[in-house]
Amino acid sequence: MIYFAKKVIKDLKGNLFLNAVTLTTIALSVLIFSAFNLFFLNAGALVNRWVEDTRIMVYLKTDLSAEAAAGLGEAIAAIPDVREVEFVSRKQAIERFRGQLGDQASLLDGITENPLPDSYEVLVGVRSWNWDHIDPIAEKIRVMKGVEEVEYGREWIGRFVNILNLFRLTLYGMGGLFFMAVVFFVANTIRLVLYSRREEIEIMRLVGASERFIKYPFYAQSLFLGGLGGLVGIGVLFELYRLLIANVGKVMVSTFFEMRFLPVENLFIILSGSAFVGWLGCYISLRKFLRS
Amino acid sequence: MAYLSKSAIIQMYRVTKRYGAKNALVDITLDVADNEFLFLSGPSGAGKTTLLKLLYLGETVSEGQIIVDGLNLSRISRRRVPFLRRKFGIIFQDYKLIPTKSVYDNVALVVEAVGVERRAIKKMVNSLLRTVKMEDRSRAFPPSLSGGEQQRVAVARAIAGNPKIIVADEPTGSLDTESARVILNLLKLYHRRGGTVIIATHDTELIRNTGGRVILLSGGYLEVSTVIPKQRP
């Protein structure tokens, strides 16, 4: 194993420039892809948080008795996917409103009668991928006896979720494009390496070296370059992330949302992917070259 | 093929090789016995190199059949070609050493390719370099060696895989007399140890000094097959 590794490193040194170019290309591609992945991950988490926190405001009719209101609350809580139901009396509502107005709370001083109705705040357990489940729940509540009006930020949720889906699609598209571009680039670089070593390969064939004996060092080099390129790309991204957190992170991080780096499983997939891309580029080139 | 000798390590039957419309070899039937020392002679363009290439599948025949140590080359699969080539040690006039590899690595390449255990490689390569008197230049690179030295390394590489047959294409063609003598002695040593040697050369002096069977080719045809006794100095 050590002997083989030494041989691979020796061969890599033999074509230092070409291999350095390949390594840089893979590292840059991984960096860009992973940066987008990181952005998507955090943006996704943020949108999910918003969506999760979406509440349906159920305003009750003013003539509804306390017993009927309590019964309505139980009926709402019995709907599947409803996680939490909180009664907000008209008095609590005006106090909250006053609190939200802050310094301008004095505006309410002129109002003699509380215009706000009693209401229920309904927390629905939806996520970004099933956010539209909120519609039938809201509809069920709307038709209940004693309900005056139902309100929730449907448009806003839809907009956020659409943006998130766009990010996701872009990520897949970018991933595909980078994959093809890197495979193409690695294949061409390996072809140049093969061309520069064609005499050596021809001699190896003449002395009876099997195709496997000729191919394996190239495969090992490409896997190594792919993996190393991936590591370098992720390493650079981590440093950039650390810098970002250290400098502007405090502005972005709040109790509501905390930025985080790519999880181990994503890193593993990216690293395996970059090693695979290296191998695939080599496989394509070798197949063509050895058949010629 | 029934009439061909059973002790032959190489059997060629009505072999023709064409490059486009040009005939390089025409209707060659030839046996090479095991442990024979054979010369292929003839002027440039007679087909000597082509005949050698056909043996190790450097080229394929246009017509006819070749059997090497029991392997019918017309039926051999692509995957089996390396096994055929391991039966040969090939020496080229232009040496064909890998310029970016040291003398040691050039020889070790064959030893590794034939699957010798890694621990034995160093010992084996050093022994081979000792045989061709190149042990002290093992770290040198081919471009820094003289023609004679490069050809000695090429001989070491050719015998490294312990082949049954050595084919040498003008092995002394670009060497001085002393270097040529050294190379020839190495080939004779290999022959004495039981190997088969086929040398393509137009150097009649070399043939007279060595002796052996000579196949004379001319314009792609086999003209004469004769045995020339070694000339006494």
Image (cartoon, rainbow, N blue to C red):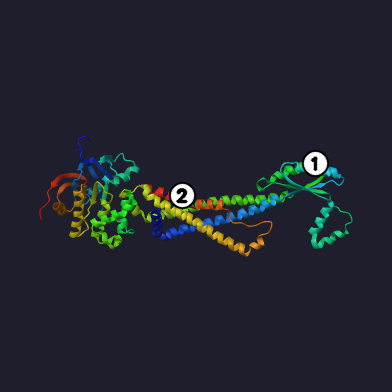
Q: Which mark is residue A144?
A: 1
Q: Quadrant of residue B222?
A: top left
**Which residue sits at x=74%, y=47%?**
A84
Residue that protrudes farthest toward the bottom in the picture: A247
Mark 2 or mark 1, which is nearer to you? 1
Residue B99, quarter of the rendered image: bottom left
Dot 2 surroundings within 10 Å: few (below 14), some, or many (20 or more)? many
**Contact (CB < 8 A) between labels 2 and 1?**
no
Which secondary structure, mark 1? loop
Left or right for A284, reference A176: left
State the CA–CA distance, disc 2 to disc 1: 61 Å
Confirm whether circles 2 and 1 share one chain: yes
The chain carrying label 1 is A
Q: Nearer the viewer, residue B63 or B129?
A: B129
For the point 56% across and 59% down, which residue is it?
A: A238
Q: Residue furthest right?
A: A112
In the rendered image, is residue A241 in sight?
A: yes
Q: Position of residue B233 (x, y in %)?
A: 10, 55
| Residue type indicated by callout 2 | Leu
User: Label 2 is found on which chain of the structure?
Assistant: A
Question: On the image, numbered disc 2 is attached to which residue?
Answer: A280
Asked if residue B22 can be seen in this view, the reply is no
Q: Residue at x 41, y 60 (%)?
A: A16
Residue B50's place in the image compared with B233, above or below, is above
The amino acid type found where label 1 is placed reads: Met
List x then y, in percent, for residue B141.
31, 61
Tell me: A268 left or right of A75. Answer: left
Which x, y percent locates residue A150?
78, 46
